[in-house]
Image (tube, rainbow, N blue to C red):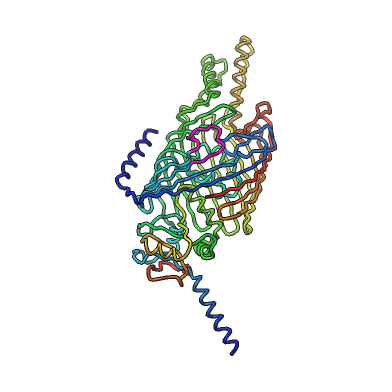
Amino acid sequence: MYKYTLFLAGVFACISSQVKANDLSVEFSGFATLSMSYSDDSDIGFSSNYLNESETGFSFSRDSILGGQANITINNNWDAVVQGIYQDRSAKYFNNFLELAFIRYRPQRNWIIRAGRMNSDLFLLSEYPYVGYAYLWARPPHAYYSFASTAGHYDGVDVEYNNQIDDGFLRVKLALGTTTPKLTAGDEQLTITFDDLYILSAVYIKDEWTFRAATSKSDVSNFESMPFNTLIDSLNTIAPSNIWPQAAHFARGFEHQHHSINYSALGLAYDNANWLIQAEAGKTKSDWMVVPSNNSGYVSVGYRVNEMTYFGGLSIAKNKKNTPEIVTPESLAYLPEAVQYATTELIEVTEYAVKRTIVDQKNVNVGAKWYYSDKVVFKVQADHFIIEPTGGGLWDIAPELGIDVEHNVNLISFSASLVF
Amino acid sequence: MKLIRFIIPVLLLFSLYTNAQDLVVVVNKSNTVNDLSKREVIDIYMGRYVTFPDGESAKPFDLPAKSELKNDFYLKLVNQNERKINAYWARVLFSGRAKPPESVQSINEVLSHLQNSESAIAYIPESEVTDVVKVVYRLNEN
């Protein structure tokens, strides 16, 4: 992080000599969503994204949010943006509520350089996932955007080039940074540091069409989690004895060292007078067992009739089966009872940890958005989720309920979103 | 004869209404930009660029929300009504990418900004064009 701090210090030193006091202006704006939703499974907690509290039954906080933004104009070439949001985060650290804090320099019409905290430009909704007024649904598609929220913003620098190409508008961006999301899994807090994060993204807009492609790579430089760290220590303790030959493999799999995550995504949107069609597909490639490889995507179709837009959609997320099956060694039966018991328990905990991270779910939703005024929209949405056996990685499933069976959850949401 | 007496005022009225709705994009008389293409007007009004094509700063102005002229302007420019434009600007503003055009209350206010600022750009009915502004684009052009 120090290199970005040094960079920012340099940037501020550079502009301080150029700013005239009378050029400086600050404008404030904000957005909010007040939501009420009901989930019909009292044993399975749902959260709209991975950083938030999971809740069952009725909830007013599941999708409610308040955001404020300051746009600071320094002069014609320099400006800055700060955005904070308040949402029901499971880990209530300042870092989890600061969404944007960057300074921007436009050296020339087609080039933009930014430094500070910025939204990861990986998805169609990357830059405004919390602005309910701006999109159709009660929340961004869960299967696609839930885990994405952990890398929703990063601290670093990006360089953007944009130009008109063949009557369309092309934007290409290269970003470098780091991010450290804090979240909770069960009741335990968990911190991951994604370092050396590179994102290359391109967006092409022509008439009603928007095409998007992005690819990213990051190293896992730190991982703090009491349950996982205890499990890794136990696996490393037993590994040299060879009582359970797979122990070393799983210890390496859960340790954060020497793992990197690649993510690539494609997006397409069509928006004419009546139809609003949007689809995205993403692929995560990872050898780190805490965030296993995954494919996800969604399709959404909306149709406008006067002030109403009716919509429906499908989304899916599925892990790739690249984790070896856990085998209990036959030699265990010949060991002392205490060793047998401890080893069996370790094998069970390892198996639970492997399965608990797997995501395999489908979702279908229908709803309507009512454009009430130029500042306020109302929405209603009904969702049906199918969580496949051992596929509840995005859900808070009570341990006694079992993760090896299929679960079905229905969710209905009513919300009002506004901008001000 | 009665028919002619009726038709002439109607035609006159119709021609006045049509002129009033013929929107033009205007800038300060001293602005070095003399002509903009539709694409260049879109670039400025949709927040893609914050400058004119020559690199000088551009500050766009909007007529009042829910006014017929504003709705007409965006329908002709990008084929989007005010609802879609509002949703678009919610996305662009809160992504930190750009700020929406400043909204003013009347054409007189627009003309005042245009007179006082070389970076100002606005759309007005052609019938409201005065000698403090120059027309750089006509919405009926394509």
The x, y position of residue A84, in whole percent, is 49, 41
Q: Nearer the viewer, residue A277 or A93?
A: A93
Image quadrant in which you'd find residue A1: top left
Q: Is residue A77 above or below residue B1?
A: above
The x, y position of residue A227, in whole percent, is 55, 23
Image quadrant in which you'd find residue A283: top right
Q: Nearer the viewer, residue A51 or A171?
A: A51
Q: Is residue A250 left or right of residue A219?
A: right
Q: Nearer the viewer, residue B44 or A174?
A: B44
Q: Is residue A395 above or below residue B28?
A: above
Residue B117 visible? The answer is yes
Q: Residue furthest left?
A: A17
Total count of labels: 0
Magenta-colored stretch includes residue A91 = yes
Q: Is residue A408 left or right of residue A282?
A: right
Image quadrant in which you'd find residue A35: top right
Q: Is residue A295 above or below residue B121?
A: above
Range of residues picked out in magenta: A84-97
The x, y position of residue B37, in whole percent, is 42, 64
